Amino acid sequence: MRTGKEYLAALNDGRRVWVGDDLVDNVATHPKTRAYARSIAAFYDLHHRPDLQDVMTFVDEDGVRRSMTWFQHRSKDDLRRKRIYLETVQRELGGGAVPRTPDVNNYVLLTYVDDPEPWSSQSVGTDGRDLTEGILDFWNEARDGDLNATPAFVDPQADRSRDSAQAESPALRVVGTSDEGITVRGVKAISTGAAFGDVIHIGVFYRPGIVAEQIIYGAVTPNTPGVTIICRESNVRDGEEVEHPLASQGDELDSIIVFEDVLIPWNRVFHIGNPQHASLYPQRVFDWLHYHSLVRAMVKAELMLGLALLITEHIGTYQLPPVQARIARFAGFHQSLKAHVIGSEDQGFFTPGGIFKPNVLMFDFGRAYYIEHIGEMVHELIDLAGRAALIYPTEGQWQRPELRPWLEALQTGPVGRPHDRLKISRVIRDMFLSDWGDRISIFENFNGTPLLAIRTLTMKRAEMSPNGAMADLARKVCGIESVSERESAYQAQANYARRQDASRQDA
């Protein structure tokens, strides 16, 4: 298994990365990127902690101990084991301060390896090449190297008033093919953490008007000639671990990726050329990311509940019945998210490749519940904290002898040490009252798909067809027979896509 030191060394590979106005020479050492690189290194090092060995690792069928990142859960108990791993990573890395760790980035590869055949057979423009061998080979290479494959799926925001704008946009497209592979040119408009990846995992979300040459799924390394990663301005508070306990852990840096006539070898091309396939499958790839997002939201809700308990205890309002009633909302928020997680696992099903997959509707609507309510929960936490989240001294001020008695008196409550209140306040400030925290909030709202897209894509799921499982009871009560498969809109979805949605394929 990879160590953090090995990961950091691999980042110095000549990749071309801009962060704001700085051209970064080495992502592992530059002041705007090194903190997040170290956080990812800490992720790798978690797998080498003896006390976490049973949680963070597993022994595969060949007797090789590997990161749980690569664990293919074949039962409900296996899935729960994977979830405990995902939770542990979030708990050990700041309760959501490092959202896109390698375990979630690589999770989206599972759909490819679970059922690789459609990716090849549905491709257009491969001259009959079998892409499945390359898909499986890439999985093995990423697993054996413990690589971090960062997704890049989002295309530019073209003029949405006309479908033809998508074809005219600078979105990534195939501009040539050869015996070696495909040559691509254009941009991917959003890729989170690409500057810190070992591999850029290219994909596409279907948009009306998308053309065949814009349908590309594959993988390239960040140092491939012609690849430039352009990151937004960094919000990191590098070297400020005391004042900014979360923001000092780094900024994962959302980025634009420019591809200038980049060659992708055939053995790293997963699919090309079929808009109909793209309209069906990307959400199935991102199902795993969305399940992880729900697990992360559950951990973050637990953190918020704990912060509400701690800060009200320190300022002396915890025992007041109205305050306790307000804190109970955080408990309800956390328990509701936990119920979605556990329910999705309990109602899971087996995919074509034998992976036990959580119930898609349950974890997607769990994500929707989080997005719908997180804003009001943040407001409630800040309101409960009062001035404690806004007005408090710096560490330098606290340590000055002439100021300390006055400042300590202002932070003294019925329980706990005055300095502990500063620590609680700093976490609340970093997570919910800073540029760094605001960026994470926006990220969570749009991670993979925003709220409207969650609902829209849900209606494309197999179960949600009028002839699908969700209408079974209504048909029975109304005395209506099922529509034949030939007449059903349910059949408009390809069988290979439906099999990623639910276990009841004939409902």
Image (cartoon, grey):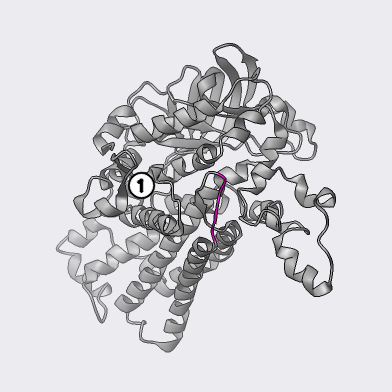
Residue at (44% x, 46% y) in the render: 104
Q: Amino acid at mark 1?
A: Met
The picture places residue 297, in percent across and down from the top left corner, at 47, 59
Q: Residue furthest left?
A: 401
Q: Is residue 468 left or right of residue 57?
A: right
**Residue drawn at x 67%, y 53% as measured from the top left:** 505
Per the image, the residue denoted by label 1 is 68
Residue 270 in picture, x, y percent from top left: 56, 29
Q: Bounds of the magenta span?
A: 348-352
Asked whether 145 or 39 is in front, the reply is 145
Task: Pick out the residue farthest to the bottom.
Answer: 321
Number of other residues with Cα within 10 Å of mark 1, as a class: few under 14, some 14 to 19, many 20 or more: many
Magenta stretch: dominant SS? Answer: loop
Q: Please, what secondary structure does the residue beneath circle 1 have?
A: helix
Q: Is residue 19 visible?
A: no
In the picture, measured across the screen, residue 59 lies left or right of residue 402, that is right
Question: Can you tell which quarter of the image residue 431 is in?
Answer: bottom left
The answer to whether residue 255 is above or below residue 367 is above
Q: Is residue 98 magenta?
A: no
Q: Residue at left 26%, top 82%? A: 414
**Identity of the residue drawn at 30% across and 47% down:** 57
Picture layout, residue 35 above or below residue 319: above
